[in-house]
Amino acid sequence: MERQYIAWKVLFLAHLVLLEAIDVPESPQFTALFAFGDSLMDPGNNNYLVNSLAKANYIPYGVDFQGPTGRFCNGRTLIDYLGYLLGLPLIPAYTTTITIATDISKGVNYASAAAGILDETGQTLGERFSLNEQVQNFEDTLNQLKQQMEEQELMYYLAKSLVVMNIGNNDYINNYLLPSLYTTSSNYTPRDYANLLIKHYSKQILALHGIGLRKFLLGGIGPLGCIPNQLGTGKAGKCDSHVNEMIGMFNSQLKDVVEQLNKNNTDSIFVYGNTFGGFTHIFNNASAYGFEVKDIGCCGVGRRITCLPLSVPCVNRDQYLFWDAFHPTQAVNQILANKAYSVVLKDNLEESSARGTNELVS
């Protein structure tokens, strides 16, 4: 056991070295960071939703960072790491900003576990903030900012802020792939469903752009067919190719949207985050990244659910790709954030000579 602990500690320190090796700017590259998404980025917004079943405000969540804050991870999420790399402080959860006095000048995180692009997504898990509601919540924040800034200052502030959006996972795992609870798989082919999602997603992106935001990082959906929850439904150790093909349809259309948005809005820049490619590379080369377990979560019951309250997680957490049946460990989040940051830093999300599809590659 002692040898196992030492090995885990060495691996953890190696991840810290990787983080510190990146040249973090002394001053923020953006005035603020605004995040929209689901449980992959939720900092605890659902803690305040009384009738929500999608919560992670209990042990062992947060065992490696601040305790059970509501993050669906053993530690930091991708957006936590990305904000740090951009020179920004940890941005507050939206629900915190409306309950206690909070500094919102550096951004706000609106992400909500079980949320989807469609309003109905995740409804079986109770209350959550859908993407539509998250955008409405941003308008609440905007009203607060209007009290702190003059109009010209506010427009400059918004134009220099970074928007990170990563959503759509639940529209599949908590909607389309649950035919006993939702009718979408009966009403739409996989391609038509992707069309529907992109239509609604584009509307919300344009709504934020219309308010004055100009720099967008739009993350695609990762390989859901490879998460433990889906691995448990097929052949042992094999990703569900059918699920991943559906995700590919969505991501392909999102890339097309990014290209069109850049063509239509020359005063802005939209970057596609290749989450699928980035995570797939880690999954297929797990040992090269220092991971030993990739088919089950560090906690939870096998491959099926999230962590149970007070359950004891694995000791060597940084050797696991997945924290529970759905969410990656902070070790994976750190790697993905580093990948995203390297491109954000290079392009600085400013106008470049190469317009069109700007993509974060793995």
Image (tube, rainbow, N blue to C red):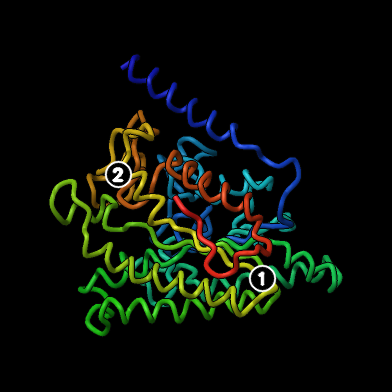
Closer to the camera in the image, 278 or 75: 278
Compared to 27, does 137 lie above or below?
below
Determine the residue positioned at 59% across, 77% down.
Answer: 263
Q: Position of residue 168 (x, y in %)?
A: 41, 67
Is any atom of residue 107 visible in this view?
yes
Amino acid at the residue labelled 2: Asn
Q: Is residue 86 left or right of residue 173?
A: right
Kindly indicate whether the residue at mark 2 contacts the one at mark 1 (C-beta within 8 angstroms): no
Q: Would you say residue 99 is visible in this rendering?
A: no
Amino acid at dot 1: Ser
Instruction: Please indicate whether residue 33 sits to the left or right of residue 145 in the image.
Output: left
Q: Secondary structure at mark 1?
A: loop
Residue name at image x 53 percent, y 59 percent: 45
Above-or-below relation of 200 to 318: below
Q: Quadrant of residue 36?
A: bottom right
Query: Alpha carbon of mark 1 to alpha carbon of mark 2: how far?
Result: 35 Å
The label shown at residue 12 is none
Where does label 2 land, which residue? 284
- Residue 28 position, x and y percent, is 73, 49
Query: What percent of the width, then of the height, locates residue 112?
Result: 49, 62
Residue named by callout 1 = 268
Query: Residue 203 vs residue 59: left or right?
Result: right
